[in-house]
Amino acid sequence: MASTLATSDPVAPTLGRQRRRKPHPLRRVVLPFVGVAVLIALWQLVCVVFDVPTYIIPRPTDVFSTLTSERSLILTHLQPTLLETIAGFLIGNGVAVVLAILFVHWRSAERALMPVAIFIRTIPIVAIAPVLVIMLGNGYAPKIVIAALISFFPTLVNMVKGLDAVDRQAMELMKVLSASRRETFFKVRMYASLPYLYASLKIATGNAVIGAIVAEWIGSQKGLGYLIIQSTYNYDTPLLYSVMVAASLIAVVFYALVEIAERLTVKWNPEETP
Amino acid sequence: MTTLIDGHTQTDAIRLADVSMTFDSDRGRVTALDGVNVEFARGGFTSLLGPSGCGKSTLLRVVADLLQPTGGQIDMLGQTPHAARTGRKLGFVFQDAALLPWRSVIDNVVLPLKVGGGASISDHADPHELLEMVGLAGRESALPHELSGGQRQRVSIARALICKPQVLLMDEPFGALDEITRDRMNDELLRIWAATGTTILFVTHSIPEAVYLSQQVLVLASRPGRVKEMVPIDLPQPRDRSVRDTAEFTAAAGYLRRVLEEC
């Protein structure tokens, strides 16, 4: 069950993509920036040429000036969102990892709880957000729970898959060596699961930000989600776009941190199954 | 699987008495081993040869206590296979080297000393000396993916030897290597065998490899897996590659081929 679900997640391709040869480092760094710069220039060009009103699409220059002028406002509202994202990310992934370890060592638990996890996943996050706000009040709690929920499922599925991604001969080796389950876990399974864990953590970075912001849409007085709702009502599109930039900045930095952690811990070639 | 089998002598390292192994699969019952009776002399080099599905690997796994036979008795150095395994009397070399890719070469070699009560083993080999013996001195801190297939298998042989095993079980260890590397590894293995005096059971698909390495070749027949014939290889010891060009070598290989054709 776990494996079929995992293949439907956009995680397996991430592992496969590493097989491609790495391009020249200069290209790797420069080309993405060139792409973004061209896109922004095109955006500016379209706005100017077709004289698009600012309240429909602001020009990049408008967004940039708002980002600087409204810096303190954005930063004030960025803080709660950041906190909810990080807390939700840690809790959601933490619970997922613990559950996956439980599932791998106790298959009955997997059979009993996996359907529940799948059911939770099928509920749209926008539908569950109001329920949680009613249940948990208007503080940090519902936002953290939603960010955690959205991080939870991909990591659970991937972690179960990763902990099982140990080849038969490695398991036989551990048996020849009379290794205990604990030793097999800490010496083999844990390492085998790391590439899978990082793949899902990277997905969770973006998702946790989305979860926190969606939760803030509902009756919140602070956070980037609140700012999005406010600026939309006021047709303050430069501010709306600035908030979008800030939100994706959180996600990008977060993603980069996970990537760095991966490079520091996964030094072997994960293409080779142990 | 209990005590000694009658007539046990010190010259036999491993004795199998009427060992059977059946698996229940979806397609019914499969008899992998059917009443196998065989002895392996202490310090001897025996190859297990046979068509696919003849139970070579199963036999090796039964001896290694990775599988429990459904019938018969096995005597390993006067102990049960379980006692021999937990006492680190046997080393196992897998086809794909089975190195842990996140552990460096030296950490892979000493793995048997880190798990399963291996820390209490005081009489073990020096890992650096072992790496020198398998020709990998200086590569201690390399990770497995930085090594070639042959080098990886050398590491796995060093790992299998770290606890000074009396029996070395090898499951097609050179099957995935190219022919040139395989020839070189064969010479290395003969050298290691001479240096350690270990009893070796060596599963292979290759007739020339079996003839070159072994003192005797156990030919197994398939469906059900059973002993066809134990063929002694009377070629001079120690051997080098020139033996492959002799008429005796060709004759032995030819004989094995004819026996295999009857399987």
Image (cartoon, rainbow, N blue to C red):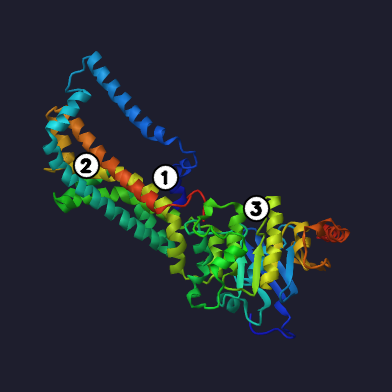
Residue A235 location, x and y as percent? 14, 27
Along the line of sight, which residue is nearer the eye, B232 or B8?
A: B232
Q: Is residue B131 visible?
A: yes
Disc marking residue A213 = 2
- Same chain for mark 2 and mark 1? The answer is yes
Looking at the rendered image, the disc whose residue lies closer to the viewer, 2 or 3, is 3
Q: Which kind of residue does numbered mark 2 sit on?
A: Ile
Residue B128 location, x and y as percent? 54, 66
Q: Earlier in the sequence, mark 2 or mark 1?
A: 1
Which residue carries the number 1 mark? A11
Q: Which kind of residue does numbered mark 3 sit on?
A: Ala
Q: Which chain's residue wears label 3? A: B
Q: Quadrant of the N terminus of chain B?
A: bottom right
Q: Dots 1 and 3: beta carbons under 8 Å? A: no
Question: Label 2 to label 1, Cα distance in Å?
Answer: 24 Å
Q: Residue placed at 59% from the left, 67% from the top?
A: B160
Q: Residue placed at 65% from the left, 85% from the top?
A: B3
Please state if B232 lies on the left or on the right of B151 as rendered: right
- When asked about the image quadrant of residue A202, the answer is top left
Q: Residues within 10 Å of mark 3 (few under 14, many from 20)?
A: some
User: Dot 3 lies on which element?
Assistant: loop
User: Dot 1 lies on which element?
Assistant: loop
Q: Residues within 10 Å of mark 2 (few under 14, many from 20)?
A: many
Please state if B17 lies on the left or on the right of A162 as rendered: right
